Image (tube, rainbow, N blue to C red):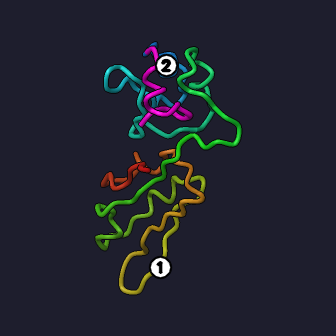
């Protein structure tokens, strides 16, 4: 996954010089040098605060923030490894979701199940690192 507000992939690859200025500018340290030295996001390191420091640092304009445009078109997805889906009580992802995009729906005879509201999800990644089973990922 590219940094927030990255150009479409082909244009991003053409524009990015792999200078790593965006990595240095990221206050949460989630940007890493990925395949080929191009910047990627690693949500195991934390979450995106959408501060846009990476965009400001990007001199070749491979990252370009457009007013009103979401940082990513991706959303969180909760997979089958989720503990409540296996009958174990867990609400960690919901506790870390500041946007309140994850809520837990009560059900008879089992742990409440997580339900993701895609309209509220910002794809910040705050829910990913705390998940004890790594059941959450960001996907299109």
**Quick one: quadrant of the N terminus?**
top left
- Residue at left 56%, top 34%? 5
Above or below, 11 against 49 in this view is above
Left or right of 73 on screen, residue 41: left
Of the image marks 2 and 1, the number of the one nearer the N terminus: 2
Q: Which of 10 and 136 lies nearest the eye of the viewer?
A: 10
* Within-10-Å neighbours for mark 2: few <14, some 14–19, many 20+: some
Residue 34 falls within the magenta-colored stretch: no
Residue sitting nearer the eye, 20 or 74: 74
* Mark 1 residue element: strand
Q: Which region of the structure is painted magenta?
A: 1-17
Residue at 43% x, 29% y: name it. Answer: 10
How many residues crowd mark 1 within 10 Å: few (<14), some (14–19), many (20+)?
Answer: few
Among the 4 quarters of the image, the one containing residue 84: bottom left
Mark 2–mark 1 contact, CB under 8 Å? no
**Which residue shows up at 29% across the image and 61% down it?**
81
**Residue hosting label 2:** 15
Q: Which mark is residue 106?
A: 1
């Amino acid at each position: 996954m590219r940094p927030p507000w990255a150009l479409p992939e082909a244009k991003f690859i053409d524009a990015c010089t792999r200078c790593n200025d965006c990595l240095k500018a990221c206050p949460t340290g989630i940007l890493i040098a990925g395949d080929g030295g191009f910047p990627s996001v690693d949500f195991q390191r934390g979450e995106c605060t959408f501060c846009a420091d990476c965009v400001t640092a990007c001199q070749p304009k491979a990252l370009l923030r457009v007013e009103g445009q979401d940082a990513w078109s991706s959303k969180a997805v909760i997979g089958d490894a989720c503990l409540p889906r296996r009958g174990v009580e867990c609400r960690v992802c919901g506790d870390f979701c500041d946007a309140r995009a994850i809520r837990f729906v009560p059900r008879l005879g089992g742990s409440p199940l997580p339900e993701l509201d895609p309209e509220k999800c910002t794809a910040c990644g705050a829910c990913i690192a705390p998940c004890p089973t790594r059941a959450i990922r960001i996907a299109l």
